[in-house]
Image (cartoon, rainbow, N blue to C red):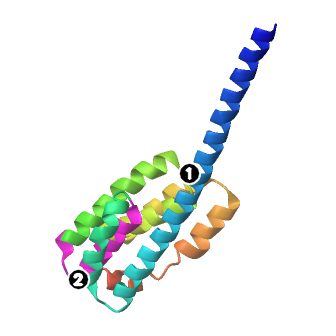
């Protein structure tokens, strides 16, 4: 019995050790995630500074450093497309928008939340124009099927000032 107790005590100690290590690891992971989010926010803030000053080439150079950390961030690809659009480089703009759309398509399959769906619709608008944007909004209504999201789509997103947006995107139809 003493031997069994010792073995149980040893198992308990091992179990507790793993639990403590797991908890410590989770805390480290949460701390790292928080630090990573803060770093990402700083990156976007700095990028926004370049874009607000219309320093498009500096913004593109800074995006290269951001891609190292977040190569599959669809918003980063959208920002790249928009930046190339401001530089009147429609080929590169379309390529970046298309990449953002591919990423959003894969994200929406897993997580069809409003944020992802509306961002996807704006990228579709940039690539294919107003009719395609309206069709993407109709797809949101078919997927989301709730009153709150329907109101948001109809009262806000469908009434977005398309002409203003189009004037900023040089190649939109």
Measuring from the top left, give residue 16's x and y in whole percent.
70, 33
> According to the image, label 2 marks what residue?
57
Total number of numbered discs in the rendering: 2
4 over 149 or under it: above or below = above
Which residue sits at x=65%, y=44%?
23
Is 32 on the left or on the right of 67, as rendered?
A: right
Which residue sits at x=58%, y=59%?
31
Query: Around disc 1, counting alpha carbons within 10 Å, would you say few (fewer than 14), some (14 to 19), or many (20 or more)?
Result: some
Measuring from the top left, give residue 116's x and y in whole percent.
50, 60
Labels 2 and 1: the sequence-earlier one: 2
Badge number at residue 143: 1
Secondary structure category for the residue under label 2 = helix
| Residue 86 in view | no
Which residue sits at x=63%, y=63%?
150
Magenta span? 73-91
Report the predominant secondary structure element of the magenta stretch.
helix
Measuring from the top left, give residue 113's x and y in whole percent.
56, 56
Which residue sits at x=71%, y=15%?
7
Q: CA distance from mark 2 to mark 1?
A: 39 Å
**Residue situated in front as seen by the camera: 21 or 108:** 21
**Residue situated in front as seen by the camera: 15 or 163:** 15
Is 163 on the left or on the right of 171, as rendered?
A: right
Measuring from the top left, give residue 133's x and y in whole percent.
42, 66
Q: Residue furthest right?
A: 1
**Residue situated in front as seen by the camera: 145 or 77:** 77
Badge number at residue 119: none
**Residue situated in front as seen by the camera: 5 or 68:** 5
Is 125 on the left or on the right of 61, as rendered?
A: right
Is 142 on the left or on the right of 50, as rendered?
A: right
Query: Around disc 2, counting alpha carbons within 10 Å, would you say few (fewer than 14), some (14 to 19), or many (20 or more)?
Result: some
| Residue 63 in view | yes
Please state, as top left, top right, bottom left or bottom right, where the N terminus lies in the image.
top right
């Amino acid at each position: 019995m003493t031997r069994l107790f010792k073995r149980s005590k040893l198992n308990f100690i091992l179990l507790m050790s793993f639990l403590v290590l797991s908890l410590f690891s989770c805390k480290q992971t949460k701390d790292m995630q928080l630090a990573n989010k803060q770093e990402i926010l700083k990156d976007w803030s700095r990028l926004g500074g370049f874009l607000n000053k219309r320093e498009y080439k500096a913004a593109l150079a800074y995006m290269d450093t951001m891609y190292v950390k977040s190569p599959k961030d669809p918003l980063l690809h959208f920002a790249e497309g928009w930046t190339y659009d401001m530089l009147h480089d429609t080929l590169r703009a379309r390529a970046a928008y298309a990449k953002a759309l591919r990423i959003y398509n894969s994200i929406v399959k897993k997580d069809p939340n409003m944020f992802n769906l509306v961002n996807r619709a704006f990228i579709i608008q940039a690539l294919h124009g107003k009719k395609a944007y309206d069709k993407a909004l109709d797809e949101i209504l078919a997927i989301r099927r709730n009153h709150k999201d329907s109101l948001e789509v109809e009262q806000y997103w469908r009434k977005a000032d398309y002409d203003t947006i189009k004037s900023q995107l040089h190649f939109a139809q």
